[in-house]
Image: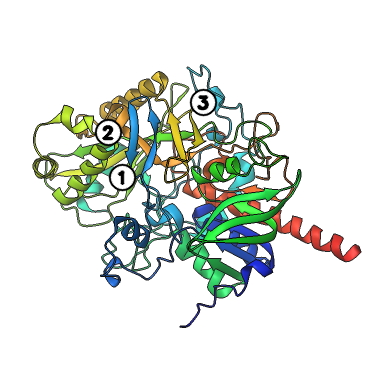
């Protein structure tokens, strides 16, 4: 049987320059950048190699666990406790080459300058740990935003409220008649709509997949970063390899303990980068206990796993009186006029990338019902199929939009180890009163701003609008080792060869999809790690 060239021989016997744990947006990007700069990189991925494959290629696979892995989806249910009860459902989390970008909508927007000085933009902070500022500024990240935008081949137009003439944006495809009317109406209402910054390309009949893309249209981390690294650069990949814990001295990681296809293995690297996502990365650190690290690796602050943040997102149908053609891109329009309103941070409003047809509506309702079974019982006694069919008729002239509202960090919102869970952890999350208030305010602002030409209908509301896919904050970076896990370079304060580059590092969540900021920061951190490796090599030669 032919062995793929990217699979290393005897990986346990080698000393890698860098081991990257996870191949989502942060891991694939930092590994690509480090490989491009000439370093030997080993990617370690729990899931399967999914690019170029389809579930229909595996007719004999029937177990839900295996089917989910082959589709690039996390195989186990997300479990935990929330303010509206226990949750036990399949969350919107990826698992495989590309991580959660396998499933994302490829909306790749920059954070705003206000996101880097977050505390001043909230009226009700209470016991939130939101910082005055990030340890890096928006201006420091701008060149890396440009690099990430070019690398991910993003199309769209400038946001007048946060413009950068040097941004590498490709031309967006022409709007549908329906969305062109919405766009023009928004401008007449005094808003500043622009063409969404998305990683889909002008391929005829692009499906704008919110799942594994088989045609190469979508800029996911696997396609844009991981594959170029393992096929064209000095990078290697171990799939079906789950990192269990890290073994470390007081100052350095010495071993990466993992299981590959059920077999324990030990890996070694000069530098280890965690990029397993904001659920799994803190779990690995908390599990990495020793005589040096009784509360978990790099956890001198006690903050590993804490400050969990999850955006809220309401689906809002935007309706117009005439039935105009919807032929054209679906993920098309974004508005940031409500991002900061009357000095208070809210969030963004954007096309969601879903057509309001019965099968899609039903699939969405099934997800909502699994997440919170009480919701459909409160809403209707009809079956989900009946609700979906009625909704598709009701919204046949509508375009689907969504809000993204910033969540605040709190110590009580956290990830904790749990041996009874198949994931090895559970989450605790409380939906705060101030979040409810801001959520309601954003939805009302949107509706009032679009009326009377456009009418809106909120499909979801209250606590079932938590976006469990936009998880962040569980290993925050900052300048103070007592108030953060990582320093401004995304390196653990207390461990000299350990970095984190997934959304765990966010000290605040913004009101924007986190993907582009993760990628931009990964380019930044990749260059920092490269400099550290060069310094290590120089010291070895001097010795």
Which callout, 1 or 2, points at the residue further toward the start of the chain?
1
Which residue is at a point 22% across and 31% down the rendered structure image?
375
Distance between the alpha carbons at the discs numbered 2 and 3: 23 Å
Q: Nearer the viewer, mark 3 or mark 1?
A: 3
Q: Position of residue 365 (x, y in %)?
A: 21, 41
Could you say which quadrant of the image residue 206 lies in? bottom left
Q: Position of residue 278 (x, y in %)?
A: 51, 43
426 left or right of 38 in image:
left
As helix, strand or loop, the secondary structure at mark 3 comes to: loop
Which callout, 3 or 1, points at the residue further toward the start of the chain?
1
Could you say which quadrant of the image residue 12 lies in? bottom right
Out of 88 and 418, give the one closest to the viewer. 418
Residue at the outermost right position: 543
Which residue is at a point 54% across and 52% down the rendered structure image?
26
Which callout, 2 or 3, points at the residue further toward the start of the chain?
2
- Residue marked by disc 3: 410
Circle 3/circle 1 CB separation < 8 Å: no
Q: Position of residue 83 (x, y in %)?
A: 37, 24
- Residue marked by disc 1: 351
- Residue marked by disc 2: 372
**Label 2 crowding class (10 Å Cα cut-off): few <14, some 14-19, many 20+?**
many
Distance between the alpha carbons at the discs numbered 3 and 1: 30 Å
Which residue is at a point 43% across and 29% down the rendered structure image?
429
Compared to 275, does 173 lie above or below? below
Compared to 18, does 437 lie above or below? above
Examine the rendering and report whether any part of residue 190 can be seen.
no
């Amino acid at each position: 049987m032919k062995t793929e060239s990217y699979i290393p021989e005897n990986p346990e016997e080698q000393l890698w320059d860098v081991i990257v744990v996870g191949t989502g947006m942060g891991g694939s990007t930092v590994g690509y950048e480090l490989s491009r700069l000439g370093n030997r990189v080993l990617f370690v991925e729990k899931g399967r190699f999914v690019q170029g494959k389809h579930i229909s290629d595996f007719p004999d696979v029937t177990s839900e666990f295996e089917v989910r892995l082959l589709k690039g989806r996390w195989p186990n249910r997300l479990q935990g406790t929330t303010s509206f009860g226990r949750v036990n459902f399949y969350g919107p989390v990826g698992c495989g080459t590309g991580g959660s970008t396998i499933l994302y909508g490829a909306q790749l927007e920059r954070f705003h300058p206000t996101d880097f000085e977050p505390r001043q933009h909230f009226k009700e902070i209470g016991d939130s740990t939101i910082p005055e500022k990030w340890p890096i500024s928006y201006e420091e990240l701008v060149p890396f935003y440009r690099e990430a935008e070019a690398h991910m081949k993003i199309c769209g137009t400038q946001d007048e409220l946060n413009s950068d003439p040097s941004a590498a944006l490709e031309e967006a495809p022409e709007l549908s008649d329906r969305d062109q009317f919405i766009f023009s109406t928004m401008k007449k209402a005094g808003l500043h709509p622009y063409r969404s910054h998305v990683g889909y390309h002008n391929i005829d009949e692009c499906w704008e997949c919110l799942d594994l893309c088989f045609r190469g249209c979508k800029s996911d981390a696997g396609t844009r970063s991981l594959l170029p690294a393992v096929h064209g650069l000095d990078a290697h990949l171990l799939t079906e390899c789950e990192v269990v814990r890290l073994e470390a001295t007081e100052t350095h990681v010495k071993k990466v303990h993992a299981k590959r296809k059920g077999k324990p293995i030990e890996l070694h690297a000069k530098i280890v980068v965690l990029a397993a996502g904001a659920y799994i990365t803190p779990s690995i650190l908390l599990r990495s206990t020793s005589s040096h690290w009784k509360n978990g690796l790099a956890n001198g602050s006690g903050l590993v796993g804490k400050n969990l943040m999850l955006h809220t997102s309401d689906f809002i149908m935007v309706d117009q009186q005439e039935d105009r053609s919807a032929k054209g891109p679906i993920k098309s329009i974004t508005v940031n006029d409500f991002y900061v309103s009357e000095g208070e941070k809210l969030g963004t409003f954007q096309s969601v990338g879903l057509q309001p047809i019965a099968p899609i509506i039903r699939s969405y309702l099934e997800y909502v019902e699994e997440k919170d079974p009480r919701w459909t019982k409160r809403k209707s006694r009809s079956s989900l199929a009946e609700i979906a069919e009625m909704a598709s008729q009701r919204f046949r002239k509508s375009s689907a939009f969504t809000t993204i509202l910033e969540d605040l960090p709190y110590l009580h919102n956290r990830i904790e180890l749990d041996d009874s869970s198949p994931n090895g952890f559970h989450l605790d999350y409380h939906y705060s009163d101030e979040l409810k208030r801001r959520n309601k305010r954003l939805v009302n602002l949107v509706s009032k701003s679009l009326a009377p030409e456009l009418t809106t209908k909120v499909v979801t509301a209250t606590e079932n609008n938590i976006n469990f896919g936009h998880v962040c904050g569980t290993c925050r970076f900052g300048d103070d080792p007592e108030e953060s896990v990582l320093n401004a370079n995304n390196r653990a304060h207390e461990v000299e060869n350990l970095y984190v580059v997934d959304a765990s590092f966010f000290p605040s969540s913004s009101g924007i999809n986190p993907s582009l900021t993760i990628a931009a920061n990964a380019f930044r951190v990749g260059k920092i790690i490269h400099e550290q490796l060069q310094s290590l090599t120089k010291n070895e030669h001097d010795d």
